[in-house]
Image (cartoon, rainbow, N blue to C red):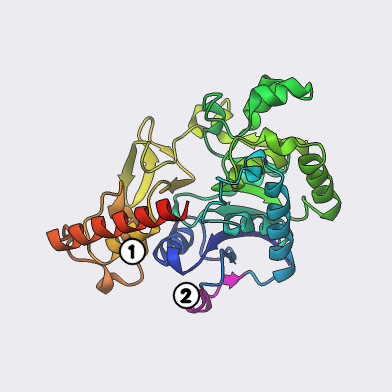
């Protein structure tokens, strides 16, 4: 058992992003911190050799834990109001995203989780320090979202009389980056949460069906453990952006800093970009991805000879074929529904 480590969630679909993340952790966090990859699903033909090639990287193999969280997700989401509507079907990503919660059953007493579509930009010593006083540590701006976009249905929760908005809002967060501790959601605690979600119908508190981040928000709110978010820090140096498609950054020696004040950031998160786009980028296609140069730097830092020398736009034939495939897929979805 290790006192501290890093988790991520991946499969072959995000292979290029996984390699870039692992390289960025090695360079910007530490080459000595153990990293454990939780399998998103069984597509691991490329992931397994990559993991085996790295001294401090392992593949999460606690199948009992993975099944526990898959069962939990399946059972609680089955009670969601939308699940009872025949016209609604489960999103294609299904249970895979919920496997990140297996980190709570893993080998590290304290850990930091990074989504695979991220690059680490600095040490996580400040996260470890906060874990001395808090059980969950986040660094995102979910608490600033409007009532309509929030992870939890704030008016509905207020109507229960259990929490007020001023108690809920500072605890809202995403699931793409967080620090926490081993064993928090044990069988007893998970059983209690399941009872509240299903029997007391608190699953309705969640604003969207089959969203692991929204479920995580419920779990951290209802378990009533101390939570810290760097974006709510009184120290302005702690409050930074992290989203590649929304926040401006400055590149200094292949490390990104918050543009305003050149503040160090924990990670850049390439949310809203498809893993297919990253695969195309790594093959030399000029894909519209913000901060793609720094992604390519970390993706090929150990294989500079394989890095695309020049990015080129796809041909008219390729573009036309892709549009045709999208049209066919859309027609298939309509015919199925």
Q: Indicate the position of residue 311 as horizontal and vertical percent values.
A: 18, 60
Q: Is residue 153 visible?
A: yes
Q: Is residue 84 left or right of residue 147?
A: right
- Image quadrant in which you'd find residue 283: bottom left
Q: Is residue 163 above or below residue 5?
A: above
Q: Residues within 10 Å of mark 1 (few under 14, many from 20)?
A: some
Who's the residue at 67% across and 39% down the image? 81
- Magenta residue check for 47: yes
Sooner in the amino-acid sequence: mark 1 or mark 2: 2
Q: Indicate the position of residue 304 as horizontal and vertical percent values.
A: 28, 70
Who's the residue at 35% across and 34% down the image? 259
Q: Indicate the position of residue 303 as horizontal and vertical percent values.
A: 32, 72
Q: Is residue 287 left or right of residue 31?
A: left
- Image quadrant in which you'd find residue 109: bottom right
Q: Looking at the image, do the residues carrying marks 1 and 2 touch, with CB atoms under 8 Å apart?
A: no
Q: Which residues are magenta?
A: 44-59
- Magenta residue check for 248: no
Q: Indicate the position of residue 157 as horizontal and vertical percent values.
A: 71, 26
- Regarding mark 2 in the picture, which secondary structure is present there? helix
Q: Which residue is mark 2?
A: 50
Using the image, tell me which numbered label, if any, was put on residue 279.
Answer: 1
Q: Identify the residue at the far left of this view.
A: 316
Residue sitting nearer the eye, 236 or 203: 203
């Amino acid at each position: 058992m290790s006192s501290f480590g890093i988790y991520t969630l991946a499969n072959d679909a995000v292979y290029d992003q996984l390699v870039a993340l692992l390289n960025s952790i090695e360079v910007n966090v530490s080459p000595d911190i153990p990293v454990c990859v939780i399998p998103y699903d069984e597509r691991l033909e490329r992931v397994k050799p990559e993991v085996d090639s790295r001294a401090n990287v392992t593949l999460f193999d606690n199948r009992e834990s993975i099944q526990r969280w898959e069962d939990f997700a399946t059972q609680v989401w089955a009670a969601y109001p939308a699940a009872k509507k025949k016209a609604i079907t489960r999103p294609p990503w299904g249970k895979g995203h919920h496997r990140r919660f297996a980190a709570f059953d893993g080998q590290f007493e304290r850990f930091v989780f990074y989504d695979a579509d991220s690059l680490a930009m600095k040490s996580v010593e400040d996260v470890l320090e906060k874990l001395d006083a808090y059980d969950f540590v986040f660094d995102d701006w979910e608490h600033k979202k409007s009532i309509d976009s929030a992870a939890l249905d704030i008016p509905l929760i207020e109507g229960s009389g259990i929490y007020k908005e001023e108690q809920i809002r500072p605890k809202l967060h995403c699931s793409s980056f967080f620090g926490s501790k081993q064993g928090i959601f044990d069988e007893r605690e998970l059983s209690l949460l399941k009872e509240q979600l299903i029997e007391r119908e608190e699953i309705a508190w969640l604003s969207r069906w089959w969203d692991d981040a929204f479920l995580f928000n419920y779990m951290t709110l209802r378990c009533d453990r101390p939570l810290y978010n760097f974006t709510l820090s009184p120290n302005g140096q702690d409050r930074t952006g992290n989203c590649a498609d929304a926040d401006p950054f400055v590149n200094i020696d292949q490390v990104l800093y918050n543009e305003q004040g050149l503040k160090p950031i924990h990670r850049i998160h390439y949310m809203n970009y498809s893993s297919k786009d990253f695969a195309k980028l790594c093959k030399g296609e000029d894909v519209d991805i913000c901060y793609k140069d720094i992604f390519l730097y970390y993706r090929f830092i150990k294989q500079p000879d394989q890095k695309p020398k020049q990015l080129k736009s796809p041909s008219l034939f390729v573009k036309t074929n892709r549009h045709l495939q999208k049209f066919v897929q859309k027609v298939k979805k309509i015919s199925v529904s």
